[in-house]
Amino acid sequence: MEENIILSKTYNFALRIIELYKYLAYEKKEYTLSKQILRSGTSVGANSEEAAGSISKKDFRAKFFIAYKEARETHYWIRLLRDSNYINKQLATELLSDLEEILKILGAILKTVSDK
C-alpha cells in the first residue's frame, strides 16, 4: 500500500504533541494549556484519518476542513507556549515548521476538492 503523506505527517506530529503534553504536565506541572494542545494537536491526524475513510466528497472535505482548523488552533497554542516560556524557541520552531508543512498540504487538499 502506498504511503499517504498527510496521514503519515499528522500521525508523527501527534506523537510529538503527546511527548510535549507529557513534558508540560509532568515536568512543568502545566495542566490547562497542555490539555488544549494535546486535544488540538492530535485532532489534526484523527480528522485526517477520518477523511481518508469518508463516504462522500462532502464528508471528505468537512473532515479535512476540521483538521485544518485544528492545525491552526495548534499553531496558536505552540506560539503561546513559546512566548510564555513553557517551551524553548528551538522546540517551538521545529513544531511550527512541521505544522506549517501540514497546513500547506491540508490547504492544497481543500483547494483541490473545492475546485472540482
Image (cartoon, rainbow, N blue to C red):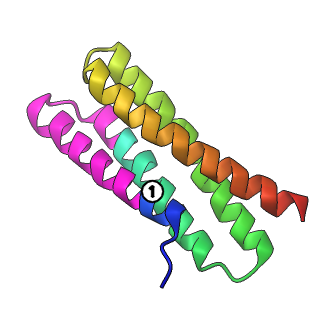
Give the answer, above or below, for where 61 lies relative to 82: below
The residue lying at 39 percent from left, 40 percent from top is: 36
- How far across and how far down the image is residue 104, in percent? 62, 44
The front one of 79 and 2 is 2
On screen, residue 57 versus residue 26, left or right, reads right
Q: Quadrant of the C terminus?
A: bottom right
- Quarter of image, res 80: top left
Residue at the farthest front position: 2
- How far across and how far down the image is residue 63, in percent? 64, 63
The front one of 23 and 7 is 7
- Quarter of image, res 21: top left
Give the answer, above or below, for where 13 lies relative to 73: below
Q: Amino acid at mark 1?
A: Thr
The front one of 3 and 88 is 3
State which region is magenta.
11-35
The residue lying at 71 percent from left, 62 percent from top is: 62
Magenta segment: does it hold 32? Answer: yes
Residue at the farthest right position: 116
Give the answer, above or below, for where 7 lies relative to 74: below
Please give the residue where the numbered disc 1 appears in the rendered image. Answer: 10
On screen, residue 11 versus residue 46, left or right, reads left
The residue lying at 61 percent from left, 70 percent from top is: 51
Q: Secondary structure at mark 1?
A: helix
- How far across and how far down the image is residue 103, in percent? 59, 44
On screen, residue 102 versus residue 40, left or right, reads right
The front one of 52 and 31 is 52
On screen, residue 47 versus residue 42, left or right, reads right
The residue lying at 78 percent from left, 74 percent from top is: 57
Q: Main secondary structure of the magenta part?
A: helix
